[in-house]
Image (tube, helix red, strand yellow):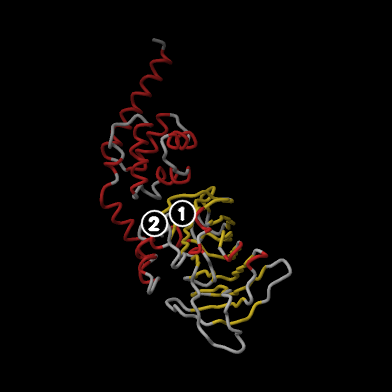
């Protein structure tokens, strides 16, 4: 054996010994980083190997795991970690054992302090239950600057899709995702809405309750943001294929804001066979199930109508288009307004 070969062999043995020690005592992030370096695998390649086994995990998440800024906590992440141990040729359970119960406990506690979800959703325990399955911590570090929702209403008054775009600014280093929630009151079906046509982001963990007409999830940015950086994302929420059923008829759309947003634009695009007699803008405070109409709106020549909220929030802001809607100038009638809605989590 040459002197150079002997040196390389000794170096590899030391690396193996160091990795074995890290797998024994941790910490988790250092051990994971060392294991990835030892196998010479890039994050993109690891992501592809995970995807081949049906596990969707972003490279940003892998990066945060090995930097120590985040740890696997959810069931899906723990399944990915188990497979990752195999990909990195590590003993089964060696990385999982380094997580420990205290790390998960501390993470949940931080999340609860930053975003006490149940208190922020008065009168809507089903939403709080849904968000309990998601980590809200990253979303608390984003400042919404501009929000735009475009709703397409098809023939017969059936809501087909909602295209949502957001401009956000990171309030700290390392923010790599935001959350969304969509609900359709009284319109629960066998299948959940679909999320597609994503721009500048990819779909992360998604949860839903079809019996309650709720879906929520993560939108993972292309990379983690630095403090002060802005990002613009876009995505489309579409009603499922069974949406030709009359229970998907819609007569309102609104967005809930838990904090003020500088600019919010909501736009409705109606099919020529489903033009409403009247549209009205409405707004309401959090917990208010019966906000009153605030302005009559006129349809444009392209069968669209829009409303703009400036420095609006907290509260609900939207448009109602029920065929029997009374004139705002002659009536203060309160109508059912929440057939379809979406929300900013913080």
State the residue at coordinates (61%, 81%): 295
The one nearer the camera, 19 or 168, is 168
Q: Residue furthest bottom?
A: 330
Quarter assignment of residue 32 = top left
Query: Which residue is most to the top?
Result: 1
Dot label at residue 134: 2
Q: Quadrant of residue 186?
A: bottom left
Q: Nearer the viewer, residue 316 or 229?
A: 316
Label 2 neighbour load within 10 Å: few <14, some 14-19, many 20+: some
Separation of marks 1 and 2 at Cα, in angstroms: 8 Å
Disc 1 crowd, CA 10 A, few/some/many (<14, 14-19, 20+): many
Q: Residue at x 34, y 38 (%)?
A: 31
Compared to 74, does 149 lie above or below?
below
Label 1–label 2 contact, CB within 8 A = yes
Looking at the picture, how far across and down is residue 268, in whole percent?
Answer: 62, 67
Is 299 positioned to the left or the right of 182 in the image? right
Quadrant where the N terminus sits is top left
Q: Which residue is mark 1?
A: 218
Q: Is residue 298 left or right of residue 54?
A: right
Residue 77: x, y in percent? 37, 45
Mark 2 lies on a secondary structure that is loop
Is 266 placed left or right of 185 in the picture?
right
Q: Secondary structure at mark 1?
A: strand
- The answer to which of 336 and 183 lies nearer the viewer is 336
Q: Earlier in the sequence, mark 1 or mark 2?
A: 2
The number of numbered badges drawn on the structure is 2
In this rendering, the answer to whether 302 lies above or below 294 is above
Q: Which mark is residue 86?
A: none
x, y (%) of residue 168?
Answer: 56, 61
Residue 112, image quadrant: bottom left
Give the percent coordinates (x, y) of residue 284: 50, 79
């Amino acid at each position: 054996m040459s002197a150079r070969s002997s040196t390389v062999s000794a170096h590899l043995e030391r690396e193996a010994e160091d990795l074995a020690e890290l797998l024994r005592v941790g910490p988790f992030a250092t051990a994971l980083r060392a294991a990835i370096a030892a196998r010479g695998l890039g994050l993109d390649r690891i992501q592809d190997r995970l995807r081949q086994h049906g596990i969707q995990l972003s490279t940003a998440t892998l990066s945060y795991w090995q930097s120590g800024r985040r740890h696997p906590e959810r069931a899906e992440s723990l399944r990915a970690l188990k497979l990752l141990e195999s990909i990195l040729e590590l003993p089964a359970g060696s990385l999982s054992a380094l997580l420990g119960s205290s790390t998960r406990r501390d993470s949940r506690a931080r999340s609860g302090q930053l975003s006490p979800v149940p208190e922020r959703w008065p009168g809507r325990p089903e939403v709080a239950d849904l968000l309990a399955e998601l980590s809200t911590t990253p979303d608390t570090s984003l400042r919404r600057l501009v929000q735009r929702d475009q709703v397409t209403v098809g023939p017969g008054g059936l809501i087909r899709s909602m295209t949502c775009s957001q401009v956000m600014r990171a309030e700290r280093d390392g923010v790599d995702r935001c959350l969304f929630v969509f609900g359709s009151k009284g319109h629960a079906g066998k299948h959940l809405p679909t999320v597609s046509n994503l721009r500048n982001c990819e779909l992360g963990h998604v949860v839903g309750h079809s019996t309650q007409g709720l879906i929520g999830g993560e939108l993972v940015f292309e990379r983690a943001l630095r403090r002060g950086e802005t990002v613009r994302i876009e995505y489309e929420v579409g009603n499922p294929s069974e949406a030709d059923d009359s229970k998907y008829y819609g007569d309102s759309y609104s967005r809930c804001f838990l904090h003020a947003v500088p600019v919010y634009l909501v736009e409705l695009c109606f099919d020529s066979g489903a033009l409403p007699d009247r549209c009205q803008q409405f707004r309401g405070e959090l917990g208010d199930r019966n906000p009153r109409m605030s302005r009559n709106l006129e349809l444009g020549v392209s069968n669209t109508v829009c409303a703009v909220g400036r420095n609006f929030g907290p509260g609900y802001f939207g448009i109602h288009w029920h065929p029997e809607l009374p004139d705002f100038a002659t009536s203060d009638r309160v109508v059912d307004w929440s057939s379809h809605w979406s929300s900013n989590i913080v």
